[in-house]
Amino acid sequence: MNSRHRLRLPLRCPVMFAADEFIGEGTVVNLGVPGCAVESQQPALPGQYVRLHVLMPDDTGSLEIPVGKVRWCHRQHFGVEFLCMSPAQQVRLGRLLKTRIDAS
């Protein structure tokens, strides 16, 4: 696992993800800009591109990441860098993280 340049907040929420070869589900265990860590029984390999739908804790539907890249994997965990997100989803993620930081 690589050291990060940006803050990741602990967060547990359901996620569905898909690559060309598979569809899986798991739990986001931390979230930040620009990525997250996922715990799942479905293996992912570094270098794979994935699409993610994260069920956010604010009950406003899923956060959609159309293109992410698996950067590392270790046993039942893998890290995803978000490569493509709509501006609206970026704002939503930023607001969620700011709210969580301000609350702590």
Image (cartoon, rainbow, N blue to C red):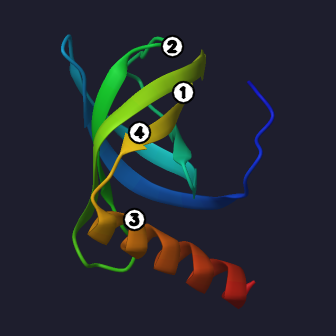
Q: Which marked residue is nearer to the observer: mark 4 or mark 1? A: 4
Percent of width and height locating residue 84: 34, 44
Marks 2 and 1, how far apart at CA:
8 Å
Vertically, is 51 above or below 92?
Answer: above
Q: Provide the secondary structure element on which disc 4 rests.
A: strand
Q: Earlier in the sequence, mark 2 or mark 3?
A: 2
Residue drawn 33% across the image and 47% down it: 15
Percent of width and height locating residue 31: 56, 55
Residue that label 2 marks: 46
Residue that label 1 marks: 78
Say what amino acid the circle numbered 4 marks. Leu
| Quadrant including the C terminus | bottom right
Residue that label 3 marks: 90
Residue drawn 56% across the image and 49% down it: 29
Say what amino acid the circle numbered 2 marks. Pro
Q: In the displayed structure, does residue 76 sit left or right of residue 24? A: right
Extreme residue toward the bottom, this view: 103
Marks 3 and 4, how far apart at CA:
11 Å
Percent of width and height locating residue 2: 76, 27
Residue that label 4 marks: 83
In the figure, residue 75 lies in which quadrant?
top right
Q: Which marked residue is nearer to the observer: mark 3 or mark 1? A: 3
Marks 4 and 1, how far apart at CA:
16 Å
Marks 3 and 1, how far apart at CA:
21 Å
| Quadrant including the N terminus | top right
Residue 98 vs residue 41, the one in the foreground: 98
Q: Which marked residue is nearer to the observer: mark 2 or mark 1? A: 2
